[in-house]
Every structure is written in C-alpha cells, then in structure tokens.
Image (tube, rainbow, N blue to C red):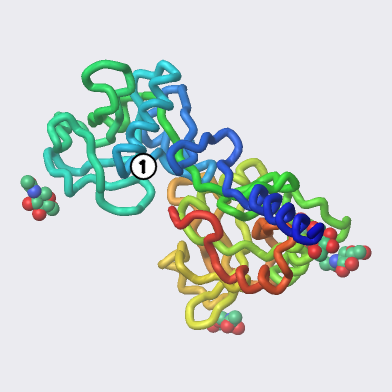
Amino acid sequence: MRKFLFFIFSFLILGIFSQPICPSGYKKTNDKCLKLHTKSLKHLEAEHECSQFGGTLATIKNAVDNRAIYTLAASAGVKSIWIGLFCYANRNSTMCFHDDNSGPMIYKNFPLGDPDLHGNNGCVFMWTSSGQTSAQWGTSSCGVVGMPFVCEAPFTLPDPTCTHNYNGYCYLPSHELKLFKNVTSNSTYSEATAICASFNATLASIHSKPEVDYIHALFKNSGAQGLILGALPADGFYWNDGSNWDYSNVNPLDKSNESCLLMDLAMKPNYGLWSKTDCHSRNHFLCKRRISQEAVPEKAKRSSDNERRPVSGQL
Ligand SMILES: *[C@@H]1O[C@H](CO)[C@@H](O)[C@H](O)[C@H]1NC(C)=O
Ligand SMILES: *[C@@H]1O[C@H](CO)[C@@H](O)[C@H](O)[C@H]1NC(C)=O
Ligand SMILES: *[C@@H]1O[C@H](CO)[C@@H](O)[C@H](O)[C@H]1NC(C)=O
Ligand SMILES: *[C@@H]1O[C@H](CO)[C@@H](O)[C@H](O)[C@H]1NC(C)=O
Ligand SMILES: *[C@@H]1O[C@H](CO)[C@@H](O)[C@H](O)[C@H]1NC(C)=O
C-alpha cells in the first residue's frame, strides 16, 4: 500500500513538472503564450522585437483567441495593437497571411468582412478600446504608424537550472559556458561536439525560422560572427542529434564542398544563413539540451529524443 501511495505521489509530482509552461514574461491565455508590449513600434520593428524571443506577433485563428488578445490589451488601457497578419490586396481576404508562416488567414474580424487597405500597405491591427469597433481589425501603414503589440511564443517545459529555455530545450551558447581553461568558444566541430556532450547536450540543430531568430538573439552581444551547427553532410546534410532535417536555411548560392555548416551571426538583414565551412575551422557554437522530464527511465528518454518537437507543433 505504501508503495502504491508513493507511486501515485511520484506520478503527481511528475505531472506537475512536465506541464508545459509559458516562457518568462509571457502569460498563458487560451492555449497561447502572450505578452503585451505597450511601447509603440512600427510593424516591422514589432515583429523584430517578438522574434528576439523566438516568437511572432500574435496570430489569431479563432474568435476565442481574438477575445483573449483583445482583453489582454484592453485591460492595460491600450487603444490598438499590431497583430501577426499582413494583407497584400484590397478587399481580398485570400491575400492575407499569418506572420507565423502558417499560410493564409483562417479567421477574420474586419468590419466589412474583407480588409480595406485605404491605399496603405496592409499591416493589420486590432482596435482595443471599448466601443463599437472593439476587437475588430483594421489595416494601417506598416512603415509609418507606431503602436503597441502582442507577441506570441511557444510553450516550453520548466527547468530551473536553465537560463535560455525555449520550446522544450535548454540552449547553452559557447560564450556563456564555464569551460575548462583549455577550451574556448573558439572550437572545431569535433571539439565542440565533445564539449556539448560534457554538458549532457548536443551541438544545436535548428528547426524553424523563429528558432534561427532566437539563436541569433542569444549571440547578440557575444561578438561572434558565426556559429558552427550540429550538421554533417550526406546527400545534403543531416542533424547529428538524430532530429529530422525539416527546415533549412543553407545559403543557396554557396557552392563550396566543405563539410560543416556555419550560421551567420552578423547584424544585417537576411542574417542567419548557413554556409559551408571547414570542420577544422574554429568557431563559436551552441549546445542544446532537451529538457527532460525528471525520472523518465533512461531508455524511454532516449527513444523519445528522436521526436523533435516536444511541446508544441506550432512552429
Ligand atoms: C483575390 O485574389 C485571388 C488570388 O490573386 C484571385 O484569384 C481572386 O480573383 C481575387 N478575388 C477578388 C474578389 O478580387
Ligand atoms: C581540457 O582539459 C580537460 C581537463 O584537464 C580535459 O579533460 C579535456 O580533454 C581538455 N580538452 C581539450 C579540447 O583539450
Ligand atoms: C582560436 O584558436 C586557434 C588555435 O588554438 C588560434 O590560432 C586562434 O588565434 C584562436 N582565435 C581566437 C579568435 O581566439
Ligand atoms: C549529466 O548527466 C549525468 C547522468 O544523468 C549527471 O550525473 C551529470 O551531473 C550531468 N552533467 C551535467 C553537466 O549536467
Ligand atoms: C574541396 O575541393 C578542393 C578543390 O577542389 C579540394 O582540394 C578539397 O579537398 C575538397 N574538400 C572536400 C572536403 O571535399
């Protein structure tokens, strides 16, 4: 009986620890992690701000999300917010697309049904003051008008030991690792692989554009120009951590025959491209560790390591 109770108790504890949580600063609202920014930014600047945390401007795909986002902004006294939607054509809803790359708009709340661009380019906002237009959408000029905005980020898992916790993984950038004196951020592919292993992690694989943005932001103040990735060649490339090659940012113009991939960390538009590089060259790197659910048997852990997305399939 005591054994049984212990079992139940452990199960409860495990249940608590493995619950997905929102990243710090984000609030769980209707199955999304949301954060209101009250400072006014232009649409592109707002998108950039959200991307620093691996997120996007909030995308709204049903009336419940719309209401939740309205409430978040309205309760802070904000009059309007940018949302993660862009329309390319006047009065044609089929030409509106979500910011998270999920494709064409699947829910809308424009007063006339279709977006009226008034000759603007079509960045979409929501009216969040109370009154007739509350929670309805309009379009405004992307590059001129500044307004508050709501960001959305993926769920993750709790890990008090982890500083950079994103989408169920802990990220350990080389410039922050407390390394032995003999190893620096300046490492070859195989040295970096060994260093990551000593932290129970692997050299990072990357699976989405928001993840590229998140990683880019991690190295913002490191002075690093490039980051060696956990990829090796075989009929293209594969991720050495066993995850699927489901996203690629390889520079299409790179005809080099080298065997490693280096992600560009420079501060420029179109940053983050992956170029081929000599595996013996020395570079910064990033270790990535799946946040484990305590006490999951070692065997089960290993087989589930092959699933890429532990928490949310949103990206
Ligand atoms: C909307 O755009 C699509 C794609 O360009 C086009 O096929 C369709 O005819 C347009 N609809 C209207 C009402 O203009
Ligand atoms: C660095 O030093 C540690 C401890 O002395 C040693 O175990 C490790 O192999 C060394 N690493 C490299 C890359 O030389
Ligand atoms: C990186 O390491 C190599 C070999 O240890 C050394 O020659 C080079 O100067 C180092 N570069 C930096 C930026 O530390
Ligand atoms: C790595 O995992 C082992 C076994 O689970 C553990 O003993 C060790 O403390 C871990 N090392 C680090 C750096 O987390
Ligand atoms: C790449 O090509 C150069 C010259 O064509 C050759 O010397 C080098 O060994 C090749 N490297 C690899 C990794 O195949």
- The residue that appears at 26% across and 29% down in the rendered structure is 141
Q: Nearer the viewer, residue 31 or 228?
A: 31
Question: Which residue is label 1 attached to?
Answer: 59
Asked if one can make out residue 183 in the rendered structure from this viewpoint, the answer is no
Q: Residue 25 lies in what quarter of the image?
A: top right
- The residue that appears at 46% across and 57% down in the rendered structure is 313
Callout 1: helix, strand or loop?
A: loop
User: Measured along the vertical axis of the image, is residue 245 above or below residue 85?
Assistant: below
Q: Residues within 10 Å of mark 1 (few under 14, many from 20)?
A: many
Dividing the image into 4 quarters, which one contains the C terminus?
Answer: bottom left
Q: Residue 129 lies in what quarter of the image?
A: top left
Most distant residue in the front direction:
1
On screen, residue 26 versus residue 62, left or right, reads right
Asked if one can make out residue 47 in the rendered structure from this viewpoint, the answer is yes
Q: Nearer the viewer, residue 11 or 36?
A: 11
Dividing the image into 4 quarters, which one contains the N terminus?
Answer: bottom right
Query: Type of residue at label 1?
Result: Thr
On screen, residue 177 versus residue 103, left or right, reads right
- The residue that appears at 38% across and 36% down in the rendered structure is 44
Give the image location of residue 142, x and y in percent: 30, 32
On screen, residue 235 versus residue 128, left or right, reads right
- The residue that appears at 29% across and 38% down in the rendered structure is 63
Give the image location of residue 255, x and y in percent: 46, 73
Give the image location of residue 244, x and y in percent: 51, 71
Tag count in the figure? 1
Q: Nearer the viewer, residue 246 or 44?
A: 246
On screen, residue 176 versus residue 256, left or right, reads right
User: Measured along the vertical axis of the image, is residue 237 above or below residue 283?
Assistant: below
Give the image location of residue 139, x and y in percent: 23, 31
